[in-house]
Image (cartoon, helix red, strand yellow):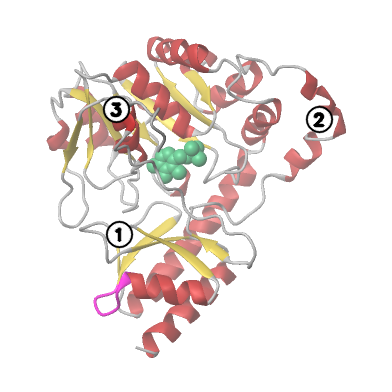
């Protein structure tokens, strides 16, 4: 820390992303990335001709991508704001809908980036405890008195709430914006996007990082009523009007054009998740009912940290959050079927060697 850093940031704990190791080849099951490449169509489209256009600014409105992505949801371009990853969409929402008087209301065990953003922008936090089984009770969010952030499915539990529960939260918070972070929505959880027409306080946040094999590209978006979106656009145009580069815009369009390809990949991931979960349970692991592309798991006799290190030695990276009450859980991203076979084999070895 330099002596120039403003006091408000002195005790800011920045978000720590999953490790991206160099050198040794690891099986990466630590950042919820997709194990499959992006659509072959994208390779065709990003050719020399596209690269030669990089001397020109991209379309600051992302018109073509907006039109196609909105159409997928039966919405209009005025219902979508594009962002450099969904983290940026979340940042716009923090700036537009939270301040020192309007708290961020969120589950106590959830995506830790929200907490970092709240601290960065001086927004008070109201953290609502999940039940001991990590389930989220909709009624705890009624009349929240602040802007609500809920990932559905939640991270790192992977557990989802129903659209009825979401609707009850929306109805009981007419004066608050409710942000449903759908980073993992393509893995077997219904989207809240169809509720946008009915609830002007609903903002749905999406990313192409997990379900569309585009974590390396940085493409996210927010869906909502035209007025909410105009608020986000006001923030976006004040921070970085060219927040999406030409290649990212092309990737967003290609996602919309080849949604089938991505949906098929997500179906494979879900099948692998279920078979891996069953195998882990057979070994004595507790696993939540995940609707995401990761498994949240704990073994009653083996410490998560020991498993983490044992797996690392065997060339497999998973994620561990060293904070109570989840310090004995691992978050394991779902890779290819063959990756998960190697994971299960490695875990068998580690358990047998204890
Ligand atoms: C991964 C993740 C994000 C961020 O995704 P990017 O689009 O890569 O920034 C947002 N929310 C949740 C819940 C996530 O797990």
Q: Which of marks 3 and 1 is in front?
A: 3
Q: Is residue 138 above or below residue 293?
A: above
- Vertically, is 15 above or below 198? below
C-alpha separation, residue under disc 3 versus residue under disc 2? 41 Å
Q: Quadrant of residue 304?
A: bottom left
Which residue corresponds to mark 3? 8
Q: Mark 2 points at which residue?
A: 51
Pick the residue in front: 117 or 174: 117
Q: In which quarter of the image is ligand 1?
A: top left
Where are the magenta residues, as a range?
299-304
Q: What element carries label 3?
A: helix
Q: Does the residue labelled 3 lie within 8 Å of ligand 1?
A: no
* Residue depicted at 42% across the width and 47% down the height: 16
Q: In the image, is residue 303 part of the stretch drawn in magenta? A: yes
Q: What element carries label 1?
A: loop
The answer to whether residue 185 is visible is: no
Closer-to-camera residue (248/262): 248
Q: Name the residue under label 1.
A: 322
């Amino acid at each position: 820390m330099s002596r120039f850093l403003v006091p408000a940031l002195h005790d800011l704990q920045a978000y720590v992303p999953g490790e991206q190791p160099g050198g040794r080849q690891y099986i990466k099951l630590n950042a919820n990335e997709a194990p499959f490449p992006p659509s072959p169509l994208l390779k065709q489209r990003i050719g020399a001709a596209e690269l030669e256009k990089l001397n020109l600014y991209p379309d600051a409105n992302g018109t073509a991508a907006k039109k196609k992505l909105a159409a997928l949801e039966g919405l209009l371009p005025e219902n979508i704001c594009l962002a450099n990853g969904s983290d940026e969409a979340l940042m716009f929402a923090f700036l537009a809908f939270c301040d020192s008087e309007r708290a961020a209301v969120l589950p106590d065990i959830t995506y830790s980036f929200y907490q970092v953003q709240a601290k960065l922008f001086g927004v008070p936090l109201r953290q609502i405890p999940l039940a001991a089984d990590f389930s989220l009770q909709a009624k705890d969010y009624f009349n929240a008195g602040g802007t609500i952030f809920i990932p559905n499915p939640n991270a790192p539990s992977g557990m989802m709430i129903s659209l009825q529960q979401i609707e009850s939260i929306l109805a009981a918070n007419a004066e608050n914006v409710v942000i449903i972070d759908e980073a993992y929505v393509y893995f077997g959880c219904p989207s809240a996007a169809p509720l946008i027409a009915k609830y002007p306080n609903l903002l749905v946040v999406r990313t192409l990082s997990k379900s569309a094999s585009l974590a390396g590209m940085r493409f996210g978006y927010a869906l909502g009523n035209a007025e909410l979106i105009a608020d986000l656009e006001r923030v976006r145009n004040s921070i970085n009007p060219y927040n999406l580069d030409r290649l990212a815009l092309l990737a967003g369009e290609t996602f919309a054009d080849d949604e089938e390809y991505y949906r098929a990949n997500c179906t494979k991931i879900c099948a692998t998740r279920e078979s891996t979960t069953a195998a882990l349970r057979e070994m004595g692991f507790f696993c939540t009912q995940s609707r995401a592309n990761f498994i949240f798991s704990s073994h009653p006799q083996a410490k998560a940290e020991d498993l983490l290190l044992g797996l690392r030695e065997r060339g497999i990276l998973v994620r561990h959050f060293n904070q109570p009450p989840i310090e004995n859980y691992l978050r394991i991203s779902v890779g290819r079927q063959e990756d998960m076979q190697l994971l299960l084999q490695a875990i068998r070895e580690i358990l047998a060697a204890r």
